[in-house]
Amino acid sequence: MLPYFATNRRPYKNRRNRMTLENFLTVVDHNRDVNGMKYIYPVVSRRAGGVSIGINLNTNNACNWRCVYCQVPNLTRGTPPPVELDVLEKELRDFLTYALHGDFMLRYVAEGDRQLKDIAFSGNGEPTSAKEFPQVLLLVENVLRDYKLLGDLKVRLITNGSLMDKPAILKSMRHLAKCSGEVWFKLDAGTQEGIARINDVNLNPQSHIERLKKCAEACPTFIQTCMFALDGEPPQETDIAAYLTLVNQVKSVVQGVHLYGLARPSYQVEAARLSRLPVERLEAVAQRIRQLGLTVYVSP
């Protein structure tokens, strides 16, 4: 059976999305419920550069962090419910079949974005907090092998990195590396105060860098950093300097930095206080990162 939006002729609508025969997916809407599936959702990713097949393991909107820019409504603290592996596998196979052999790209994706770029563990919370994460990764590997995509299609983990000191998670990172995988590891600030302000967690920056190092040793890893204005004020020089000091510690082990701004509205209580930075300001920070010897991709 094909995905909901491939078989139902009526437009599928909710308050955050308009995915119809007349409207394409865009980078400003990453609604997880767009296709009526439980775990699988398609998005056009500005950072991936095309269509990304998202895997949402946190179907209860639970996460161990609460980033102020998070686009998940009704976000709660916690871990995901048990993953129904059979359901996830069927949805992934159904969607891959539709994307590769059906008219999904023509109907829902603008011409310049009609490329399947990756399968991404992302969704509505921290993916590695699902106890079935290792099993899901094996499932994805087997499906890609069946579709003759293993090694050609990227498998990405978008993570806050909070569990990268766990042996089981690091073992999964080594497995991910064998699946043409890579990690996008969150680092939004360089001080404990900044992390608390942005990610709403009490975290020692140096401990987080040590987790980042372990992750990068196990699997190719990019830093992902969101920068924005808070109450109209951009990050202060002291904040940027502290961030650069941390990045400098891992420049020899990471693949680069994805520096991005706000593309979609936050659903957190701080939403009204957040605003986008001009691209020139993001580029100025990117240039300082490049001076450390790192590749930087900017997505304003």
Image (tube, rainbow, N blue to C red):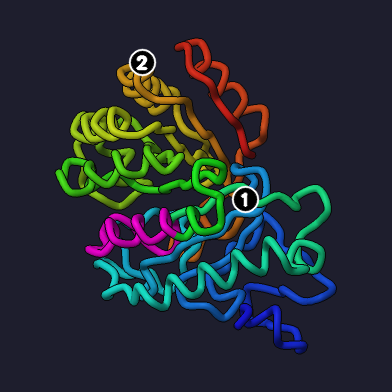
Q: Quadrant of the N terminus?
A: bottom right
- Left or right position of 163 against 229: left
Element carrying mark 2: loop
Residue segment shown in magenta: 122-142
At x 35% / y 55%, what residue is drawn? 137
Taking the image as drawn, is residue 64 in sight? no
How many residues crowd mark 1 within 10 Å: few (<14), some (14–19), many (20+)? many
Circle 2 residues within 10 Å: few <14, some 14–19, many ≥20 = some
Residue name at image x 49 percent, y 65 percent:
267
Name the N-terminal-most of marks 2 and 1: 1
From this viewpoint, is residue 36 visible?
yes
The image shows residue 248 at horizontal and vertical percentages of 36, 17
Depth check: 107 or 291 in front?
107
Left or right: residue 253 compared with residue 17: left
- Front residue of 12 and 62: 12
Q: Is residue 260 left or right of residue 25?
A: left
Residue type, label 2: Ser
* Residue drawn at 41 percent across, 74 percent down: 74
Residue 156: x, y in percent? 46, 46
| Direction from residue 262 to residue 190 in the image, left or right | left
Numbered mark located on residue 252 in the image: 2
Q: What secondary structure is marked by label 1? A: strand
- The picture places residue 105, in percent across and down from the top left corner, at 76, 62
Q: State the predominant SS element of the stretch in magenta.
A: helix
Disc 2/disc 1 C-alpha distance (Å): 27 Å
Residue 45: which disc? 1
Measured along the vertical axis of the image, is residue 83 above or below residue 175? below
